[in-house]
Image (tube, rainbow, N blue to C red):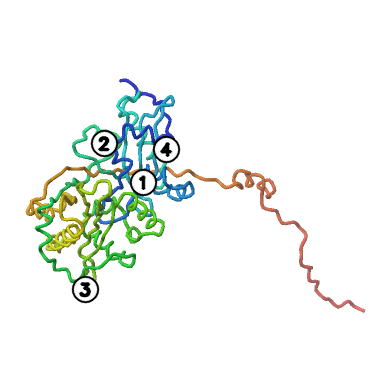
């Protein structure tokens, strides 16, 4: 049996000088496009791409954003072999996700060896992570084999759908019956958390490990998202449906609109949508889709399309999308694995001085034996002497 080859690659953080080389073999979506959707399908927190972090943000801001996005490069003899990008999935950083792994075809140690080295480095370096998740195209067999080799197991399958211009125009003609459609704010975090919990199976919910704080937008996140949207000519719209009798949210949507640019005003606009519906209120799918179509067509009614996804545990959504003649664009696989980090035992400074041994010599070796000296004086009997 041949031993596992020794990897001579060096893993280091991504630097600004590496971007020019990475752009040669990475697709434009890996460096310039914003990650539109999270795996939960409900949260609306966006992440800034590597190109944006390294180019237009100053150094102090990059230091503040370091916990959100981490990127590492595999280098051998001064040549880059590949890179990996990871980010925390929830606010308490108990679950992390692998955003992208890119390995050069001409890697000296082999694509699987370099990819394994990058993945294992992240698994060992991110000590706060207890669970790792990722989403990969189902047609990328080599990439799926790489993840399975490193302990990732499939959990669910997602299907990407596209609604064309004609279908959106037809849906926009219907007036949606949504009297309790509310805008999203931080005050509604508990309602969105309950909705997201009810819409997911228990094993998916356990892997995501979300809490109420994951549905609140921090000030720093708002600033980063606003700057990212302006740079990429995007606009976001969100809302949720409130049920007054149950005092709960039963539907939610997050819409990311692509605005036309001055250079290409007639290009096709592709909008992205996240949709979450309570399993007991599946009649909301036509109403929410009509509301989204009205927002999309209001901006531009020609040469537009809407993309959204559905999971294999959402059969009602898939049936409705087939009913409105939505087109399947691709399938992806949700994979996850757990990590247990050994906590090192810490010893105090006093334990290193071995004071217990030093003080033991000052202790008596045995209990003292009481002496013959009596502490109390003897009582003499009084007798009368004869005269």
Identify the element where label 2 is drawn.
helix
Identify the element where label 4 is drawn.
loop
Q: Earlier in the sequence, mark 2 or mark 4?
A: 4
Query: Which label sits in the foreground, 2 or 4?
Result: 4
Give the residue at mark 2.
148
Q: CA distance from mark 3 to mark 1?
A: 37 Å
Give the residue at mark 1.
87
Q: Earlier in the sequence, mark 3 or mark 4?
A: 4
- The residue most toward the top is 2
Query: Residue 264's spot in the image, x, y percent?
Result: 24, 46
Identify the element where label 3 is drawn.
loop
Query: Which label sits in the foreground, 1 or 4?
Result: 4
Give the residue at mark 3.
244
Query: Which label sits in the foreground, 3 or 4?
Result: 4
Measuring 29% from the left and 39% from the top, which residue is drawn there?
A: 28
Query: Residue 303's spot in the image, x, y percent?
Result: 16, 50
Residue placed most toward the observer, 289 or 66: 289
Give the residue at mark 4.
14
Query: Which label sits in the foreground, 2 or 1?
Result: 1
């Amino acid at each position: 049996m041949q031993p596992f080859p020794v990897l001579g690659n060096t893993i280091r953080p991504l630097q600004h000088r590496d971007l020019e080389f990475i752009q040669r073999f990475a697709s434009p979506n890996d460096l310039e496009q914003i990650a539109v959707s999270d795996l939960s399908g409900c949260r609306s927190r966006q992440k800034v791409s590597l190109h944006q972090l390294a180019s237009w943000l100053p150094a102090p801001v990059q230091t503040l954003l370091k916990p959100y996005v981490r990127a590492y490069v595999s280098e051998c003899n001064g040549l880059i072999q590949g890179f990996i990008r990871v980010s925390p999935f929830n606010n308490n950083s108990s679950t992390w996700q692998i955003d992208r792994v890119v390995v050069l075809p001409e890697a000296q140690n082999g694509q699987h060896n370099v990819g394994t080295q990058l993945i294992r480095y992240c698994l060992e370096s991110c000590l706060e992570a207890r669970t790792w998740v990722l989403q990969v195209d189902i047609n990328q067999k080599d990439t799926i084999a790489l993840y399975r080799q490193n302990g990732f197991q499939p959990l669910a399958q997602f299907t990407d759908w596209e609604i064309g211009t004609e279908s959106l125009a037809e849906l926009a003609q219907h007036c949606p019956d949504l009297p309790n459609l509310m805008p999203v704010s931080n005050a509604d975090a508990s309602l969105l958390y309950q909705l997201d919990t009810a819409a997911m199976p228990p094993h998916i919910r356990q892997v995501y490990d979300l809490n109420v704080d994951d549905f609140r937008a921090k000030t720093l996140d708002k600033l980063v998202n606003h700057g990212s949207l302006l740079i990429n000519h995007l606009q976001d719209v969100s809302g949720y449906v409130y049920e007054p009798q149950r005092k709960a949210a039963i539907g939610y949507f997050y819409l990311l609109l692509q605005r036309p640019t001055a250079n290409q005003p007639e290009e096709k606009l592709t909008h992205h949508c996240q949709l979450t519906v309570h399993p007991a209120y599946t009649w909301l799918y036509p109403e929410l889709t009509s509301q989204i179509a009205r927002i999309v067509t209001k901006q531009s009614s020609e040469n537009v399309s809407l993309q959204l996804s559905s999971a294999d545990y959402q059969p009602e959504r898939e049936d409705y999308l087939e009913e409105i003649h939505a087109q399947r664009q691709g399938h992806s696989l949700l994979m996850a694995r757990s990590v247990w980090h050994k906590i090192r035992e810490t010893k105090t400074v006093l334990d290193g001085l071995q004071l217990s041994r030093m003080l033991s010599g000052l202790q008596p070796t045995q209990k003292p034996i009481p002496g013959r000296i009596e502490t109390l004086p003897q009582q003499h009997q009084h007798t009368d002497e004869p005269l």
